[in-house]
């Protein structure tokens, strides 16, 4: 996944890049029943600051205010989505199952499901905190496109 943003700070081996959320939900046929669509409506125009690793390029080759492209690996996105969506769901089902084992009460099963969901949410948060400094999970600056040596195009 590629994204563009403006450099707002340079921090050793990383850049702080400001992005603006863009919504494509206006053209989607499922916009009324989609939670992402609702979140995009609430957050349109919101500016986000993302820490982006430099990779091989030196920090001196970037300037404040410059536009840069950065990317996140597709594998990282898939794994993150699985953790964020599946972990609370599986914890909720486990909580409901455990509560059902102790008692046949539907009310207790619902409370167990709620507690399981909360535990799953807390596990997602814990994973987020523990992996926040993992370089494999961080976005990286895309290499600058060099125009040196390129022949100009002549239009007749």
Image (spheres, rainbow, N blue to C red):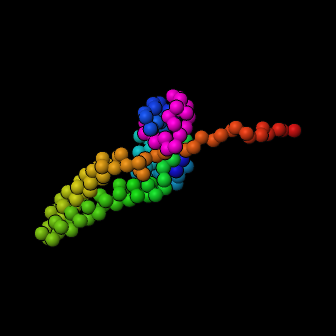
Q: Nearer the viewer, residue 156 or 147?
A: 147
Q: Is residue 137 left or right of residue 102?
A: right
| Label tally | 0
Please check the rendered image and state whether residue 65 is part of the magenta-colored stretch, yes or no.
yes
Residue occupying the point 37% across, 49% down: 134
Q: Is residue 101 left or right of residue 52?
A: left
Which of the 4 image quarters holds residue 104? bottom left
Range of magenta residues: 49-68
Q: Is residue 9 left or right of residue 87?
A: right
Residue occupying the point 49% across, 56% down: 74
Q: Nearer the viewer, residue 96 or 50?
A: 50
Residue occupying the point 22% across, 59% down: 116
Image x and y of residue 43, in percent = 43, 39
Which of the 4 image quarters holds residue 83? bottom left
Query: Quick check: can you spot residue 38?
Result: no
Identify whether 79 is placed above or below 60: below
Image x and y of residue 109, in percent = 18, 64
The quadrant of the picture occupied by the C terminus is top right
Identify whether 74 is placed above or below 70: below
Residue at the outermost left position: 103
Identify whether 68 is placed above or below 36: above
Image x and y of residue 55, in percent = 49, 44
Residue occupying the point 69% across, 38% down: 147
Query: Quick check: can you spot residue 31?
Result: yes
Residue at the outermost top position: 64
Q: Is residue 116 left or right of residue 10?
A: left
């Amino acid at each position: 996944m590629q994204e563009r943003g403006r450099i707002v700070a340079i921090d050793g081996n990383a850049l702080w890049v400001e992005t603006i959320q863009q919504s494509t939900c206006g053209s989607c046929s499922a916009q009324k029943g989609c939670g992402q669509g609702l979140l995009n409506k609430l957050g349109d125009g919101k500016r986000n600051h993302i820490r982006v690793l430099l990779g091989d390029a030196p920090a001196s080759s970037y300037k404040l205010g410059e536009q840069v492209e950065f990317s996140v690996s597709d594998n990282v996105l898939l794994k993150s989505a699985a953790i964020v969506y599946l972990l609370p769901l599986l914890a909720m089902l486990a909580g409901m199952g455990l509560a059902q084992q102790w008692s046949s009460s539907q009310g207790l099963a619902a409370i167990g499901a709620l507690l399981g969901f909360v535990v799953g949410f807390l596990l997602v948060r814990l994973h987020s905190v523990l992996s926040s400094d993992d370089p494999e999970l961080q976005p990286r600056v895309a290499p600058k496109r060099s125009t040196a040596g390129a022949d100009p195009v002549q239009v007749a």
